[in-house]
């Protein structure tokens, strides 16, 4: 007995090894959450059972060793493994139940939206300041004075004042920040600051100042030009 | 039985156990990971709460949470560099009162050295900068517990926006500081619950509430003026605070019940299978 189970067991084990250890190492991939691995293993198991029960003969061949293992009939040296399984199964069920019912020590999960939708009046605005080297240079000067303490002299979000803030100041050299956004979006964020964010942006946590009370619009537009130039990024456009 | 057959049996038997374990454990929540400090946890002490003793031995039973500090650059008057870069926080409670110990490095003891703890009050979120108004979110007030070295006491305050900081008419907070070898230890104490839920944060056991910190180094510059004062201070972001509830063993009871059910299921199943095989 047992021979017909070797291949399914090996298949499921290989599937687990593949999902857990191989997939995360594929370029551009990421580690799979355990719930997804569980789902894939269940699908694999379902496929194996469907395949094994296509005919009466294959069904008997598949289930007979399982039934024999559970009842302990004619399994010889497998008795030890059987007892191990019979002890392990209730323990695993208990462990699983404990994990899902015990009180958690983790603080509430926070799903903060990093780039929430801007208010209508800020969509599609174009920068009214002409992109001359002088204006860009002036924008970089304003950036150094007002923005670099947090966003960093290298536009990398690692300014000397950044470390205590959560969420951390944006890293403009990261292609997922200002390169994904239009200039009008930056204008909104700089002007209204953290407190201007909608609820999904968790405005109560942001240290971004509301610069509209301190800087004229023209300076803000120049800062935006300086930021893109300094971080070697281009604003997103619809073309 | 042939040896080859025996080996195959072992492979499939052990494999079946392993696969079951994998599938079951795959669905189980991951083991608790060593997390960075995002929360201060206050365990319950059985003996006396060290309400005015920053050096009491019982503090070592509370796990320290470490938070980075930034100079306050969010609103004027700003400051671009502050003395205190990190803060270590421990907390304890005795079911009636809570005690929070702030610990930080400061090279010199000055009369104007000061520290503060800020909490949100009630269900509404409040901005970490003194609960200033937010454009699209109706915010709530913040409750601030303040201590200054030369005053030798705690002050219970509220704010809801810049320039609205107000000392409460009812003072529930006590604070004591001790300076030694370039380190400040400051203990704040207050009853877990007060009779003023609109002004005072209420610390329900087991619940997470938002907490933030501020520290002022009271050193003076060459002209004799304070370098860190008012809004010019070291600040933290919002983190979490929890006064731990008494231990809850219900998870163990549920687990024992589920394991017993699984055992019973196995027993009935195998009995039925054996009857079927015999027939």
Image: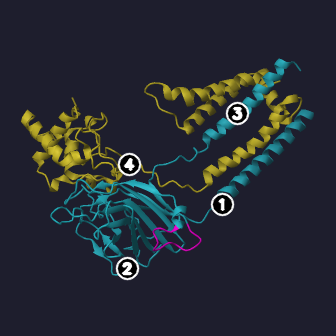
Q: Pinpoint residue B255: horizontal percent, then vertical percent.
A: 69, 53
- Residue at 87% of width from left, 18% of height from top? B2
Of all residues, the one furthest to the right in this rendering is: B278
Chain colored cyan = B
The stretch of residues the image draws in magenta is B44-56
State the image quarter where residue B139 is shown: bottom left
- Vertical placement of residue B9 versus B222, above or below: above
The chain under label 1 reads B
Q: Which tag, 3 or 1, sits closer to the chain's start? A: 3
> Circle 1 sits in a helix, a strand or a loop, which is it?
loop
User: Where does label 1 land, which residue?
Assistant: B249
- Comparing marks 1 and 2, which lies closer to the viewer? 2
Q: Which residue sits at x=85%, y=19%? A: B3
Q: Quadrant of residue A178?
A: top left
Viewed as shown, does residue A232 lie left or right of A69?
A: left
| CA gap, disc 1 and disc 2 | 37 Å
The CA distance from mark 3 to mark 1 is: 30 Å
Which residue is identified by label 2? B171
Q: Mark 3 points at which residue?
A: B18
For disc 4, the marked residue is A112
In the rendered image, which quarter contains the C terminus of chain A? top left
């Amino acid at each position: 007995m047992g021979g017909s189970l070797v291949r399914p067991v090996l298949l499921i084990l290989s599937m687990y090894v593949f999902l857990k250890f191989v997939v995360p190492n594929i370029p551009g991939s990421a580690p799979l959450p355990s719930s997804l691995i569980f789902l894939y293993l269940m699908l694999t198991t379902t496929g194996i059972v469907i395949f094994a029960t296509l005919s009466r003969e294959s069904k008997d061949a598949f289930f007979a060793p399982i039934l024999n293992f559970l009842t302990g009939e004619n399994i010889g040296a497998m008795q030890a493994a059987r007892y191990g399984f019979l002890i392990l199964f209730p323990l695993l069920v208990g462990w699983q139940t404990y994990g899902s019912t015990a009180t958690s020590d983790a603080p509430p999960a926070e799903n903060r939206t990093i780039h929430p939708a801007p208010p209508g009046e800020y969509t599609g605005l174009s920068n009214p300041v002409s992109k001359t080297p002088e204006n860009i240079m002036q924008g970089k000067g304003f950036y150094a004075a007002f923005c670099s303490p947090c966003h960093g002299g290298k536009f990398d979000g690692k300014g000397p004042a950044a470390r205590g803030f959560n969420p951390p100041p944006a890293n403009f050299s990261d292609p997922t920040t200002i390169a994904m956004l239009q200039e009008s979006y930056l204008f909104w964020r700089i002007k209204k600051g953290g407190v201007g964010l909608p609820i999904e942006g968790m405005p109560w946590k942001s240290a971004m100042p509301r610069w509209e009370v301190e800087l004229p619009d023209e300076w803000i537009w120049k800062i935006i030009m300086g930021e893109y130039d300094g971080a070697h990024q281009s604003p997103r456009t619809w073309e | 039985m042939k040896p080859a057959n025996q080996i195959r049996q072992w492979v499939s038997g052990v494999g079946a156990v392993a696969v079951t374990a994998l599938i079951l454990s795959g669905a189980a929540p991951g083991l608790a990971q060593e997390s960075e400090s995002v929360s201060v946890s206050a365990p319950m002490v059985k003996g006396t709460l060290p309400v005015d003793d920053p050096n009491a031995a019982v503090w070592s039973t509370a796990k320290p949470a470490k938070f980075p500090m930034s100079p306050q650059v969010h609103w004027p008057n700003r400051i671009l560099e502050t003395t205190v870069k990190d803060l270590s926080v421990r907390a304890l409670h005795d079911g009636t009162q809570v005690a929070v110990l702030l610990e930080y490095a400061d090279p010199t003891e000055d009369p104007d050295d000061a520290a503060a703890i800020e909490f949100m009050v009630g269900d509404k979120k409040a901005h970490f900068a003194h609960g200033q108004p937010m454009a699209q979110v109706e915010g709530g007030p913040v409750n601030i517990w303040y201590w200054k070295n030369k005053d030798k006491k705690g002050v219970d305050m509220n704010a809801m926006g810049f320039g609205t900081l107000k000392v409460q008419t009812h003072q529930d907070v006590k604070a004591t500081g001790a300076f030694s070898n370039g380190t400040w230890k400051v203990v704040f104490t207050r009853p877990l619950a007060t009779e003023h839920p609109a002004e005072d944060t209420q610390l329900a056991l087991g619940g997470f509430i938002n907490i933030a910190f501020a520290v002022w180094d009271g050193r003076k510059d060459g002209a004799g003026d304070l370098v860190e004062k008012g809004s010019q201070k070291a600040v933290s972001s919002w983190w979490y605070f929890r006064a731990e509830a008494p231990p809850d063993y219900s998870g163990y009871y549920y687990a024992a019940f589920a394991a017993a059910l699984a055992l019973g299921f196995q027993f009935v199943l195998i009995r039925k299978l054996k009857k079927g095989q015999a027939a």
